[in-house]
Image: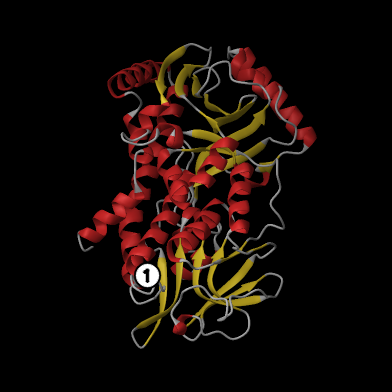
Amino acid sequence: MPRISKKNAPAWEASAVESSGDDVTIAIVGGGIAGLVLALSLHKNIGVVPTVYEQSKTFTDGVGGAIGMYPNGLRVIRDISPDLLATIRSAGYPYLYRRWYRHDGTQVVSAKECVLVPSGSDEDELAPIGIRRWKLQRALCDACEAAGIPIHFAKRVESVHETCQIGTRLIFSDGSKINARLVFGADGVKSKVRDSVMHGPGKTEPEYTGVTCLMGSSSVPRPNRGICFPSSVTTKCHMCTYPTGPNETIFQIYFPTEVENPESWGTLSSGQEKREVTELANQLEADGWAAQFVEPLRKATPGSIVRVGLRSRDPLTKWFNLAEKEGKVCGAIVLLGDAAHPPVPYIGQGAMMAIEDAGTIAFLLKKLCVDSNSGNFSMTNFRKAMTAYERLRIPRTGNVLGKSKVLGKTQQDRANGSWYNYFREWSIWIQVKLYGTLPIMKPGAMYSYRDDVTKCLAAGE
């Protein structure tokens, strides 16, 4: 079992690396975006090499959906490495514009995405992009390999056991186990690590929102640059399309669906995929949808269609748990990303909140837990650091993800009624003309995690 030995351990207090057998200093459970960004951020900020445990058997190129990346998340990446940011930007595609439409192709209004880049920032570096999730994960994985950060696959956590003697013991489904001083739970909505912090699933499970989304990719290029939001009062649904390359469009169609049916969620079979996409394209066409929105469905990339039910809940009120002995922290479990706050996707900030979490953790540890003289990492102020983490991140994620729910509701309300749609179109037009974009987008994108941490510490919080 891989471990960090004393001989090869990074700068760390001797008491924190006492180990026997299969021990690691820092274990990150989950090799998704949150886990990999955290691994890189910890390595950059505190000089410690964490170990990542991922339940998947491997990372596969060419599969999965896509995400939008905004200045607040891109800033974290840049702070890890400007070269990594350049790699990620080259794998994605700039939005340039944000456009609202009627389903028949009539444009309500358009906004320039550069409005979301804070003044004084380099627009070319931080401007929003669309990127396939696998390309982002590949870039992060390659960066971890270059930094010597080990990633172990097929490691699904079965149970988590806290103890003052060894910190935390993780037992995996293959029967293997490790002991870790610090465990970071980046293992998503169905987090096993979360249960150990909250002491059982209880009310931590997200609830179905009543909306189902059909998403996929297509080789059809957008006729106009930008991320687009058409809504239809005829089909009673709304849509989001955005580019991830010059000849690749991602589409997401949201339908109100009262009955939760998890058995139908997931990647569709080839036969089911062709049938459902064809039927939906025919329906949209009959309902008067413009060809620019229907064509991506008709030319969807085989194997790309996924149906998911949207689930959400408010952020947890507790994000970490400590094991202490004689007043000293000897182990800790900390949550981040979807394990702490599963999002709904309407504002494009789900992955960005996870990336912010990772950057905030690493920066707090650098400020509070690294000796300025020796450069050694210490657990002495770990409780203070994680208390600040909760104080910063719980209201931040609650605010931004709450705005996402509001924005999603307005889009669906547009589809549900002609009068509201008329009012909402005028509201969107006026807001864009006054503020350059919808003001609801700005608190998410125009945020600096470093500024927030610095203000918090300066205030002595």
Which residue is situated farthest in the right direction here?
271
Q: Residue furthest left?
A: 459
Residue at 28%, 55% (x, y): give it: 454
In the image, taking residue 199 as reference, residue 147 lies left or right, namely right
Image quadrant in which you'd find residue 177: bottom right
Amino acid carrying label 1: it is: Val
Above-or-below relation of 403 to 197: above
Q: Is residue 129 above or below residue 37?
A: above
Foreground residue among 295 and 354: 354
- Considering every residue shown, the one lying at the far front of the view is 373
Residue 394: image x %, image y %? Answer: 35, 55
**Spot occupied by residue 176 in the image (x, y as percentages of width and height):** 68, 75
Look at mark 1 in the image and give the residue it sits on: 370
Quadrant containing the N terminus is bottom right
| Residue 458 position in % (x across, y down) | 22, 59
Q: Residue at x 51, y 63 (%)?
A: 185
Q: Quadrant of residue 290?
A: top right
